[in-house]
Amino acid sequence: MECEFPTINSNMDEVKEIFDNVKTIAVLGLSPDESKDSHRVAKYLQSQGYKIVPVYPKGETILGEKVYTSLADIPFVVDMVDIFRKAAALDAIADACIARGDVKVFWAQKGIVNNKAAQKAQDAGMKVVQNQCSMVDHRNLQA
């Protein structure tokens, strides 16, 4: 497996601005399993006042929120996508974000880097964060 170094990434001032301005976060790959990172991170963000939108292939609700099977199925504005998927999936996710036209932040979680997808998202006007945990960054900014 080849690991990429993130060449496109927001700095911490931009990350703070992201958290100050987003309200709705679609969590792609949000598992119903409470032991999974995606579940813990989404639950934390939800506890901080963000509207969490689970995107997962099955299930009706996660964390009390309706589950959507794809980003395209969400019928309201999504400010940020928080991605818990393999790096290879990010190209299609960037395309889906661009197709929506309302996503402002493309966030790939810790260990996930795809510079081609990140460039595509950035070129479409999105802020990009790669290889960082949204929960850790949010907690650090609150300290």
Image (tube, grey):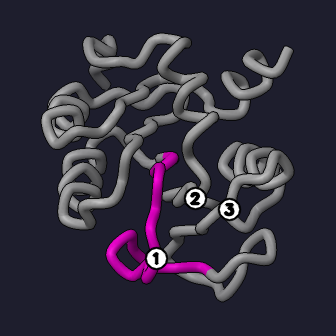
Give the answer, above or below, for where 57 lies relative to 24. Answer: below
- The residues bearing labels 2 and 3 have C-alpha atoms spaced at a distance of 5 Å
Q: How crowded is the residue under tag 1: few (<14 C-alpha within 10 Å), some, or many (20+)?
A: few
136 displayed left or right of 79: right
Residue named by callout 2 = 24
Please name whichever residue, 16 or 119, is drawn nearer the observer in this view of the structure: 16
Mark toward the start of the polypeptide (1 vs 3): 3
Q: Is residue 73 magenta?
A: yes
Under mark 2, the amino acid is Thr
Please name whichever residue, 77 or 119, is drawn nearer the observer in this view of the structure: 77
- The residues bearing labels 1 and 3 have C-alpha atoms spaced at a distance of 12 Å
Please name whichever residue, 113 or 44, is drawn nearer the observer in this view of the structure: 44
Specify the label residue 51 is tagged with: 3
Cβ atoms under marks 1 and 2 closer than 8 Å = yes
* Residue stretch rendered in magenta on the structure: 67-82
Please name the residue shown 51% across and 47% down the image: 82
- The residues bearing labels 1 and 2 have C-alpha atoms spaced at a distance of 9 Å
88 displayed left or right of 63: left
Please name the residue shown 72% across and 44% down the image: 41
Mark toward the start of the polypeptide (1 vs 2): 2
Q: How crowded is the residue under tag 2: few (<14 C-alpha within 10 Å), some, or many (20+)?
A: some
Quick one: quadrant of the N terminus? top left
Under mark 3, the amino acid is Lys
134 displayed left or right of 85: right
Q: How crowded is the residue under tag 3: few (<14 C-alpha within 10 Å), some, or many (20+)?
A: some
Which percent across, then down, holds residue 122?
22, 33
Quarter of the rendering containing residue 119: top left
Residue named by callout 1 = 76
